Structures are given as C-alpha cells and as structure tokens.
Image (tube, rainbow, N blue to C red):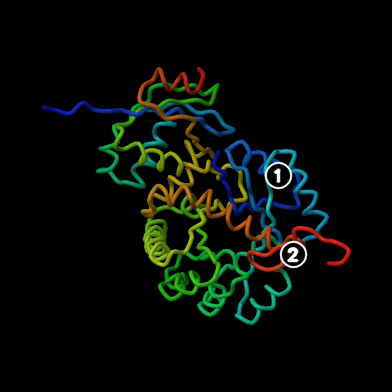
Amino acid sequence: MLKRVKRRYLALEIDADEVFGSKEFMDAVWSAVLKLYGEYGASQAGLTLIDFDMEKRFAVVRTVHTAADMVRTALASITKIGDKPAAVHILAVSGTIKALYKKTKR
Amino acid sequence: MKRIYADLHLRPNLKDSEQVSHVVSKAAKLGYRLVAITFSSNFPEEEIRRLRSICKEAKIDMASRVDLRPRTPRELIRDLRRLRRKFEIIAVVCESKNVARQAAKDRRVDLLNFPSVDFRKRFFDGAEAELASNGAASLEIDVKLLLTLEGSPRIRLLSNLRKEAAIAKEFHVPIITSSGVSDEMLMRKPRELAGLTHLFDLDEISAIEAVSKNPVAIVRRNREKLSPRFVAPGIRIVRGGRDC
C-alpha cells in the first residue's frame, strides 16, 4: 500500500521594495531549489504555491515533509526575485493550513 | 530558557548612521539579541559608545569587533598586543599560512576567518584545527559568499566548507556562522543561517549552536576578561575593602 504523503506548509514573508507577481515569485523559488539541489532534488520537493498576497508581502507554499529542510535552505538562498533585490523569510511551518494561519494569526 | 541568537559579523557603513540603525533594527526584527559590529582598529571610542546606545534602543546587545589582516605573524602579535583590550571580539582574516598558524595558536584570537574562494588560500586543515583546539579560536563561516556566488565558484566553496566543517568537528573546534553582510537585504534569520549550513553537512544541533551557544560563549568569556574585576580564569574580585 502506498504511504500517505505528509506535507508541510510554509508561511513566508517577502522582503522587497519592489512589487512582483506570483509567477515571478515561484520562478525564483524553483530556480533556488534547482541551483542548490538540481533537477532530481527539485522533483522530490513537491512545491506548490498555496497563497500569495503581494500587498501584505505574504505567501504560503506547500512541500513534502521530507523535503522541508531542503526548501527552507533554498528559500534562505534567494537574493533576487525577477532581477529585483529581495529576501524570503520563513514565518512559520505547519502540517496543516489551518494551524499555519492560526500560528501567523491570519 | 529562551535561546540567544547572535550574529558576530555585521559590517554596516559606519559613516552612515542611518544605515547602521537600519541594520541594527533589522537584526532585532529577525530575532537576534546579540550582534557584533566590525570597527576599524582606530575607530573612536565615543562613536562605539554612541552605537551601543543605538543598539540599546533597538533592544539588542552589541559587541565591538575588529578584523585583523596581518601580512606576517609578527604583525599579528603586535596588533593583538595593541588591540586585545580595546575590542570584545578579535577576528583574524587569514590570507597566508604563517598568519593562520600563528592566529590559531594564540589564545587572544577569537575567530579565524578564511575569506578566499580559492582552495589554495584556505588554510583550515588538520594542523590548523589542532592548534585552534588547543588555543581558544573558533572557525568563522560567513554565509555572504554562499548567497552572492553562483555556479562553479559556489560549488567549489561548498566543497571547501564541507571539508573544513568536518575537520572542525573532528578536532572539536567551535564553528560560528555569521552573515558577514553590509547590505540589510542579505541578512537572514538565525534559523535560516542554520538552514544554509545544511549545504555543507553540518548537523542540526551544531548548526543551531553555531548561531547561538558558540558566539554567545565567546562574547561572555571576553566580557569577563575585559571586566576590571577579572584576575585570572576562574578568579575575580568579589569585594574590595580598605585593607585589600
């Protein structure tokens, strides 16, 4: 029997002076994972964008729990989003979206 | 007890007081409770005191740090004699093997920093680690290069850092992870700095200690030594009387 996939939801704060879209943001995340862990590593991350609010500089991404450390490292290595200087800080990590929003009080 | 996170290598532009206060308040916002700011060796003490008050306003503790870049071991000894009692942290940027060896065995040196990407100019090998473990020096790893380099230079750097971290662990040399940045956009949370050390195979406990326990221990030890009550390790003046 296939094992149930455990997930981790990461609440992120986008630290940037400029504004950009969700596509540019996810491109930066994917590119960071690819640069550090290659295509094989990126294929194991199971990255999905769940929520993105540029006004509040807030995003939520989902990953597989086994790749959570890998994604955390990759997110910390982001220095640019769409050629604009930016940083991504992790606000909270949780196993469910409900608990994540509770932690971040949203 | 809540863990104290420290970044021992902040390099804001000291001529721009606005940038300094931005960097300090950003460090406080990111969760640091102790930062070390790098000064030049002839930086006026009143200015250091003024920066300390800026840090106090931001509810963050500041330690003074100086980076020495001596060309010869003799120059290093001379600088240490002149500056050891002026600064809380002394880091030696090792650009030659002789200097690296002298810095590792001198107990007045707190941090050994190897800034070069070229593996021939990184002198943290077994012999260096053995000297450092007998002395009091720790290996400092700046993550700035990890963030700014790309492609093959970063691959080579990671490979070198992996070897150095393994050697440090084998010889029980404490590792300090610092940001080493002057730009606030490159500052990271302590847990993120610890996360970046996974790239060179530092285990989770060592990674967290490299941004908390190890740097805090250096600052505590040096503050005790610099206090007027200090006599020798383990001996300090508790009370002074007329007949003492």
Front in this rendered view, residue B53 or A64: B53
**Kind of residue indicated by mark 1:** Gln
Front in this rendered view, residue A87 or B10: B10
Callout 1: chain: B
Front in this rendered view, residue B33 or A89: B33
Residue furthest toward the right? B242
Which percent across, then down, holds residue B37?
67, 53
Q: Quadrant of the N terminus of chain A?
A: top left
- N-terminal of the pair, mark 1 or mark 2, is 1
Query: Residue shown at 50%/25% (left/top)?
Result: A58
Q: Quadrant of residue B113?
A: bottom right
Which percent across, then down, holds residue B19?
70, 44
Q: How far separated are the C-alphas under marks 1 and 2?
A: 24 Å
**Kind of residue indicated by mark 2:** Lys
Cβ–Cβ below 8 Å for labels 1 and 2? no
Give the vertical position of A92 relative to B184 (above or below): above
Q: Quadrant of residue B90?
A: bottom right
Residue furthest toward the front? B243
The local secondary structure at tag 1 comes to helix
Give the vertical position of B42 relative to A29 (above or below): below
**Front of the two marks 1 and 2:** 2
* Residue carrying label 2: B86
* Residue carrying label 1: B19
Q: Is residue B109 shown left or right of residue A10?
A: right
Callout 2: chain: B
